[in-house]
Image (tube, helix red, strand yellow):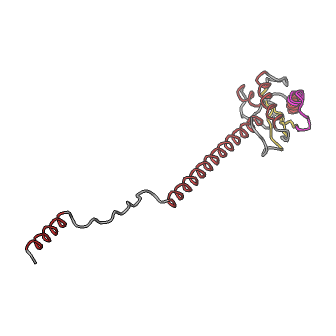
Amino acid sequence: MSNRFILASLVTALAVGACGGPEEPQVAPQPTGPTAEELERMRQDSIQRAREEEEARLRAEQERREREAAQRAEAARQTLREPVYFDYDEAALRSDTESRLRAKLEVLRANPGVRLRMEGHADERGTSEYNLALGNERVESVVRFLTGFGLDGGRFSTVSFGEERPAMQGSNETAWAQNRRVEFVITAGSDGIVGQ
């Protein structure tokens, strides 16, 4: 072999070696994001979360409405149970008594299944017989007022206790004013009361 051939082979070998040798085949880069299955799973999870959040919102709204309805119903019961008061030796309705009865009237109209027992009371002054009669007159004036607005009198029962069941003990004007009253007891329909 000639020196030339060796020299040419050597130069070629050095040139090829210096160039880094034969090129390696290019490999396509692998995707770094989620796969199609992962994307679908994320989409389904997002849909499920949205459904759960909407269901929770609807439950909370329903609970809020039920709480408010229960509060309105309890306020209506309180309105019905609130006593009305009278002046000394009177069965005539005072303006504050009429105002309270009008509030009861609205509740009674909205709740036709409600029945009331009205209990008439008097203070200790006067005879027992007189106070029983006065308690009865007071109850009757309340019934006339309510039925005068179209309510069925059959929804009401009445009783007079006269001076027998004082709301406040004492022989003074403060006690007497509390004892001259008509009290209301819900006898039917209490569970179904709707407030306004």
> Residue, x 80% and y 23% (percent of image)?
88
Magenta-span inclusion, residue 154: yes
Magenta-span inclusion, residue 129: no
Task: Give the image location of residue 180, x and y in percent.
Answer: 79, 29
> Is residue 160 depicted above or below 61 in this figure?
above
Main secondary structure of the magenta stretch:
helix
> Is residue 145 depicted above or below 54 in this figure?
above
How many numbered discs, if any?
0
Asked whether residue 130 is in view, the answer is no
Q: Quadrant of the N terminus?
A: bottom left
Q: Quadrant of the C terminus?
A: top right
Residue 21 vs residue 119: left or right?
Answer: left
Asked whether residue 56 is in view, the answer is yes
Task: Give the image location of residue 150, x and y in percent.
Answer: 90, 30
The part of the image, by quadrant, that contains residue 16 is bottom left
> Residue, x 84% and y 36% (percent of image)?
118
Task: Give the image location of residue 135, x and y in percent.
Answer: 85, 31
Chain part drawn in magenta: 142-156
Task: Give the image location of residue 10, x and y in percent.
Answer: 12, 70
Name of the residue lying farthest toward the top = 95
> Is residue 9 depicted above or below 130 in this figure?
below
189 and 137: which is toward the camera: 189
The part of the image, by quadrant, that contains residue 127 is top right
> Is residue 194 depicted above or below 135 in this figure?
below
Name of the residue lying farthest toward the left = 3
Name of the residue lying farthest toward the bottom = 1
